Image (tube, rainbow, N blue to C red):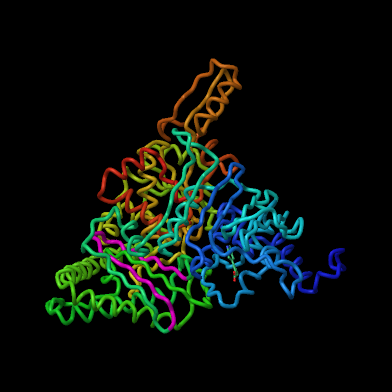
Amino acid sequence: MSEEAKKPNYSADSIQALEGMEHVRMRPSMYIGDVGVRGLHHLVYEVVDNSIDEALAGHCDEISVDINEDNSITVRDNGRGIPVGIHKKEGVSALEVVMTKIGAGGKFDKDSYKVSGGLHGVGVSCVNALSDHLKATVHRDGKIWEQEYERGKALYPVKAVGESDITGTEVTFKPDTSIFQQTIEYSYDTLASRMRELAYLNKGITVVMTDKREKDEKGEFITETFHSEEGLKEFIRFLDGNREPLIADVISMEGEKNGIPVEVAMVYNTSFTENLHSYVNNINTHEGGTHLSGFRRGLTHTLKKYADGSGMLDKLKFEISGDDFREGLTAIVSVKVAEPQFEGQTKTKLGNREVTSAVSQAVSEMLENYLEEHPNDAKTIVQKVILAAQARHAARKAREMVQRKTVMSGGGLPGKLSDCSEQDPVKCEVFLVEGDSAGGTAKQGRDRNFQAILPLRGKILNVEKAMQHKVFENEEIRNIFTALGVTIGTEEDSKALNLEKLRYHKIVIMCDADVDGSHISTLILTFFFRYMKELIENGHVYIATPPLYLVKKGAKKEYAWNDKERDEWIEKFGGGANVQRYKGLGEMNAEQLWDTTMNPEFRTLRQVNIDNGSEADRIFSMLMGDEVPPRREFIEKNAVYANIDA
Ligand code: 0RA
């Protein structure tokens, strides 16, 4: 037993609590997913969620999040303030219980309808356990209260440090570098896009995000205020801002069905992609689940009924499938569920059965009303659905050719692929290389045991603007499918992916380090995002990072990946160095390419992951859609990876 356990005011429960906190430090990934960049940002979401809960309970309308100079984070709200009175059962302040007891959350406030909660809903005590230092400041009952902690342990009992005529809670924490060994550097963009999302999902709340690490030209901190009066309706306009609308309005509804709060907003655009985003208690349910099934069911059922009644389908010779109703659809479904059951690989699939019919009913009602009141829009939508059905028939033929080719193994591999000799996919890598000439260099430079090369000719098809059958007819894209051993589409689901025969576990996009190269990387990423999303989700997709400069003096040579590194080498070489700027992979010889970009010992691969699905979708539609100006600006800033966080 520890020393503390013998002290009289530590009950058996608090010994358990202590052990709980230690367990969090021993197995952090069990609580926050991982201890990399994602887990680091997760800490912030966990703290903000508590303030969101306070807002949803109707006691708070302003939340601020600061990234401080030392990468500590301050989250502030104007809620009631976490209670500081002595908690009867625990014998310490309620604040201390919340901060130091795993799973305490807001439990002692039974009336609160706690719906938010981080991905794992672990509570602020986990953040405390994983922080070097944390300080909680509460404005409440006319006073300012304070308590500090180190690695989750209170340094002193809560104390009054001043008077106050406001209420609210402020938490400042600094992640523990012994836990987050990779980095504790926060990404403003990552946090800001989550705060924007939260503002849309919880209309009326103001979230102010500030980066205090750097000042802009005017000498001011970067800051953004997120606030939405219309919620999901505005969210849809934001997501679809770069697409051409098919109908003028965003169709939306908000209400309660069978005791489940349901919010839905949707619009049709002229694109061919389906964009469904779903949330449960403000958590993005990437894998969908019962609420999304409910949405699909309600949509298909209502539109089909309307289309049948309109007589527009009379001459159609084949059935319309569920997919056809969702081409060019952007929709968000957000539900609040008291006891959500999360399933699936990443625990982001809602399992609660009762939610399906609640959402389905809500969608049917919303859509029936809309179609009745907007007959012209209704006709436009049905026409689009018919076109989609016709295109699907054309696509099926093209797709079946992809499948047939892939099924024939060995001889079926594309001629341009230089395969590796290793057979175990886990050990195999394939480099998708822009252009035949760089492809040739890569082929010479690689380790043929486990590295394969697939050269892609010039710009690959922009799938964002192409109909499905064009995508499947495209030779480069078919080569990617066959080379990877991936098939797509079954009778029920034309987008279902079969990854069982995936031939490489690392798929590396290798393009020039210039604007054209990043455009091509983006085209390839767009293709993966739209047609092989699971490859990204399962962490198979990487981006190679070729160097920008070669700095030489006499026999000494070093590579540099940015201007700072270049200047450092020039200085180390004592001036008079020769600097070669690589304009493309083609300028490197095979040995240089191997040394800098392909050799697993020295290269840096950036793993592509989708932290924020709706943001990634918006960026791809912007980059690859019709509107030229925003795309130009974005690509010129060369921030292709800003929110894809490779
Ligand atoms: C439970 C009860 C009460 C406030 C809170 C929780 C609370 C928690 C957090 C976490 C971050 N900000 C917060 N704001 C409030 C107060 C109950 C009462 O005053 O009667």
Residue 238 left/right relative to 157: left
Q: Is residue 346 visible?
A: no
First to last magenta residue range? 259-280
Q: Main secondary structure of the magenta part?
A: strand
Which residue is rendered at x = 43% and y = 64% of the image?
A: 202
> Which quarter of the figure has residue 489?
bottom left
Residue sitting farthest toward the top:
576
Q: Position of residue 568 (x, y in %)?
A: 57, 26
* Closer to the camera in the image, 86 or 329: 86
Residue 277 included in the magenta stretch of the image = yes
Give the vertical position of 535 relative to 113 (above or below): above
Q: How many marks?
A: 0
Looking at the image, residue 287 lies above or below residue 622: below
Residue closest to the eye, 537 or 402: 537
Q: Position of residue 347 (x, y in %)?
A: 53, 69
Which percent across, then down, holds residue 310?
14, 79
Residue drawn at x 44%, y 34% is: 218
- Residue 401 visible in rendering: yes
x then y, percent, for residue 371: 20, 75
Query: Relative to 539, is 359 above or below?
Result: below
Q: Is residue 636 magenta?
A: no
Q: Is residue 533 left or right of residue 551?
A: left
Q: Quadrant of the N terminus?
A: bottom right
Q: Residue at x 53, y 29 (%)?
A: 564
- Quadrant where ligand 1 appears: bottom right
